[in-house]
Amino acid sequence: MKNSIILISLLVGSNSLLYGDIPSSKQKSKIQCNMTVKYIKRPKNVDSLSQLLTDGMFYGRFRTNNSIYEKIDKSGDSINLGGSLLYKSARYKHLSFTSSIYFNNNKKDTILTSAQSYIAYTKSRVKVKLGRFLIETLLAKSHDTGMIPNAFEGAYLKSSIISKNKIQLAYLTKQKLNSHDKFHHLLAFDENDDGAMHRGITLEKLNEKNIKDRLIIFEIENRNIKNLNLLLNYTSVPKLLSLLSIEGKIKFKNRSGLLIKPAIRYTHQFDNGAGEIGGANLRDDTRGYNNPNSLTSSILLSRVDFQYKSASLRLAYSKVADKGDIVAPWQSAPTIGYTSAMSQKNWYANSSTVMIRGDYSFSSDTPLNGMHIVGRYAIENFDDNKPSQSSDKNLYTLDFIKRFKSNPNLMVKLRTKFERERYRIQNSDKSYKKSPYSNEVRLEINYLF
């Protein structure tokens, strides 16, 4: 981990970057803190079919994502160079299309794929996409740590036609994970090898029961009441399982300028046949589970944010019922926005997490010139009587995010993670649970053009 110290020193020593949300006239798009791309300038409406192509716009991205990791039984590094070139056509009679090429070159191979390729119909405050696209819902996101984003194939509708309500509907037939170049099944372990995928739900078992693993999503976000945000999400794989989530977020501001933002979310998982096929545990080891053949479960999450000027503090908690594990292999953690950090899987049955998070953005008149820092400390408690789960652990993360003031298209992000076992846990067969010890440093550089 010696190189970790060098990377931190290089980044902190630079004061020519600026973090901020005000777009520059030079920008066509920007990278947000969660690494999704926001398009600032878009192609215009045109009056002829010939202008559909000639008045379109290209969006480019070069990036590097390098990491150094150390675990209890191995260590190594990952060096990635990648990018994308995306074309959005102009809009003619409400119709347009988007096409893209993404690539990633690492020590093992070179991946080249078209993650986005769709036709769009946009009218008023309704947009429909058909083809391959990215979506951002509670349990399905375009997570792109693997350089190439997680994408889906199917049909998608987004509408804000009802005042102060955002509605998303999706019928998805295929998924392409962020490290893959091909689209594949959504809930079959043979093809979907995401870390949160259920190992016991295989393509062979689905074919035996003639089950097509399609993903149906309905999500509505309501802001009718001032300072109150309500969200309802229903994510379902018919004949296997479904998840219903309800979330409420509210904010208060006192006279001193302190903003207080409590939030609570409850997710219930309905087992519609997946538990009988794969069992209650994601790793196909149901020892210690009350009902080894049921994936019925739930998770309760809560948090409160205290925000004052450029600083904020978050206290968060999550608790999974002592039933089945939560199934969510679509690249968004069920604990996201609460106790999720650096791709941690903290939603196994009877597990709980307490987290404290601090954020701070330095202003332009300080030596650090606009750097944004995020720090987290989490205590993750797992069920000692379930051998498939990790030992309890402490988690520490520290992130640095900066942009160049003279070049707003450039962003640098450094992430560090340290995991430590809290105490050794002995199983009934006298073996010990595997230690979660690990260190990791990730450095990412993004340039948009």
Image (spheres, rainbow, N blue to C red):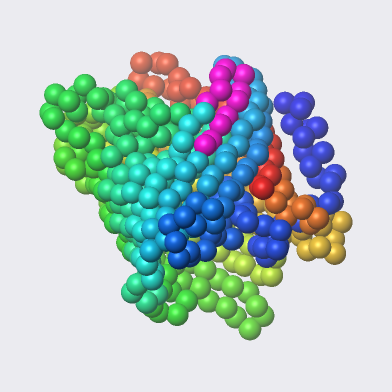
- Asked if the magenta segment contains residue 402, the reply would be no
Residue 435 placed where, x, y %? 52, 24
Name the residue rendered at 61%, 55% in the picture: 29
Q: Quadrant of the N terminus?
A: top right
Is residue 259 or residue 319 the one in the foreground? 259
Q: Is residue 162 above or below residue 265?
A: below
Is residue 193 or residue 105 the one in the foreground? 105
Residue 263 placed where, x, y %? 45, 64
Is residue 10 or residue 45 the one in the foreground? 45
Task: Report the number of numbered marks.
Answer: 0
Quarter of the image for residue 145 reads top right
**Is 248 situated left or right of 206 in this image?**
right
Work out whether residue 272 can be spotted.
yes
**Is 165 situated left or right of 444 in this image?**
left
**Is 448 situated left or right of 18 in this image?**
left
Is residue 75 or residue 314 the one in the foreground? 75
| Magenta-tinted stretch | 101-111
Quarter of the image for residue 245 reads bottom left
Name the residue rendered at 74%, 31% in the picture: 4
Q: Main secondary structure of the magenta part?
A: strand
